[in-house]
Image: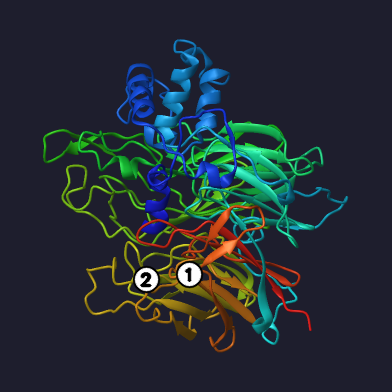
Amino acid sequence: MKTYLLLICLFSNVFFNNLQAQERSKELLSPMESSKLELSDAIKEEGKKVYISTCAACHNQNSTVKNAGPTKALLGGMTTKAIYTALSSGKMKMQGSTISDEQRKAVAQFLTNRPMVEIVLPKEAFTVFSIPKGVSYKSGWGGNLEGTSFEKQSQINAQNVGSLKVKWTFAFPDGTQVRSKPAVVGDWLIIGSQFGDVYALNKKTGKIGWHYQGSTAIRGAIAIAKNSNGELLAYFADYATNVYALSLASGKLIWKNRSGVHPQSSNTGSVAVFQNTVFVPLTSSEVSSSKDPNFECCTSSGELVAMNATTGEIKWRHRVITEEAKESGKKKDGKSFFGPSGAIVWCSPTIDTQRGLVYIGTGENYTDPATNTSDAIQAIDIKTGKLVWNFQATTHDTWNLACPGEPNCPDKAGPDLDFGSAPLLVKAGYNGKDIIVAGQKSGVVHALDPSTGKVIWQTRIGKGGALGGIHWGMATDGKNVYAANADNIYAIDAQDENRKPSPGLYAINIGNGEVIWQSPTPTCPQGKNCIQANSAAPLALPDLVFAGTLEGHIRAYDNKTGKILWEFDTVKEYEAINGIKGKGGSIDGPSPVVSENMLYVNSGYGMFGEVAGNVLIAFELEKK
């Protein structure tokens, strides 16, 4: 995905580096108490020593052990409690039995750089949870199987949007980024978090109905669906590629299974659920491991995995690169390159129920040789996992985080022009026929025939580049497609000197690709250091488009003219409903969510120079 999305997904433990921790492993602490504790050097050293002697052989980046476990970077994205539990009574119980209980705690805290404490929220933060039979719900990356990010039932419109006021905020403990998109189920929001927590929040009050603690970061949307037994479940994946099914009624785990098989497989996209099947997109943290000059780069492939929604069993596995990697050349230091690799899947799958297809976008190759499946849109048979068609937008794009100039960078580094955003399936969108619309980091929007992958039209709206172009997605009301352009001066395509960055929100005619209007991202306030760009996915309503910016504003645009009708600066401190200190930041990642007379916005994205934050903000139309 974008090097934002791309890099985001990559540094699985970067966002922990500034978090504070503590030594007292079993204390129950209030949120304020926990933030003041630090992990001692003694625990760090003990944990490091135990990791090297007991764990490293199976978890190092270059491990030669068959069926090696997740790398240290992936382990760093887990919760401290999850690692300790695995060593004490879980999958790693046998390995953990060779060390003391204190050593198990030390290695868990060393890997995450976080304390093993239980933060106790005040009783006032909780409420009774209940859902009626036949409850309505809306979930997933784009709010539907087609991924359109269009909500036609909202009470919010162009006439009353100016009366939106903050109703409540919920702050995620220790959070620096908020990127899980909440599902709406009746009176409840179901949302994941940076440290593996899943909350059921009352959508009117923000109070917690139930809470589930997962193993590691949840970076995508929560999907709600019934399994073959008719049970309504919440499905999601974590960064380590574990897929979960929770009972919606209680928040209790029904099943959990790891979808990835490569040691560095990871997940940043949202799952989709259809016909009792969970579709899971997989990327790889090798893109960041490549920074290590001693790392044997690279052997992973992007994947789409289909799992039984009732049992969690894997039904089929689609590899974007069909062949296994092998030695493909020599680096400048004389060591071996491996390939083909990469062509990862950052984005969420889109389901075509009529044609029986699932669509994905892919990223760059990590190493040579380049494949024709990188920077591509693919259509895959829902039942078999077989590739039906492949459209490649950019050829020979080989890139990883060792570029430029480091040993693991390919000889001819590509521009890193992923499809990081999910494709949109628009019903009757082109002369009465269905159409696939996909936005790329190149700054180009592609319209494709959903049956063949052939190009219908292509429209450039930006300069594009590793941190430019279309990152997280688009939205459509069936007439126009609304695309956020993240061009910015910090990282754009230097190969095109004639085109200037053009960040903002664009409306494009779905029938012919013509740009109807463009609304440039407003400049930052004087004296405010920020990145001026629209990167987060937008949300379309019948007469409005909501879109957030990297400097923290959420704005409502008139969908006919692009005029800004309402805006709110989220970068401030909040008294959160759950007793945690809240702070807003950059808006990046998924689109906002609306339900009835309320708007829900994630605020906080502490990566790549963006502003950290930890809040979900609920706005409500002011009553007259």
Residue beneath the point at 48% across and 69% down = 552
Instruction: Residue 436 in the image: state x and y as whole percent.
Output: 55, 65
The residue carrying pointer 1 sits among few (fewer than 14), some (14 to 19) or many (20 or more) residues within 10 Å by Cα, namely: many
- Which residue is disc 2 drawn over? 530
Residue at the far left in the pictured view: 333
Q: Amino acid at mark 2?
A: Cys
Residue beneath the point at 21% across and 42% down = 408
Instruction: Residue 242 in the image: state x and y as whole percent.
Output: 55, 36
Find residue 332 and name its label: none
- Compared with residue 158, is residue 99 higher up or lower down, i.e. above or below? above
- Which residue is disc 1 drawn over? 552
Decide if residue 552 is in sight here: yes
Q: Quadrant of the C terminus?
A: bottom right
Instruction: Using the image as rendered, state which of residue 13 and residue 341 is in the foreground.
Output: 13
**Does the CB distance between marks 2 and 1 fall below 8 Å?**
yes
Instruction: Using the image as rendered, state which of residue 155 and residue 111 is in the foreground.
Output: 111
The residue carrying pointer 2 sits among few (fewer than 14), some (14 to 19) or many (20 or more) residues within 10 Å by Cα, namely: some
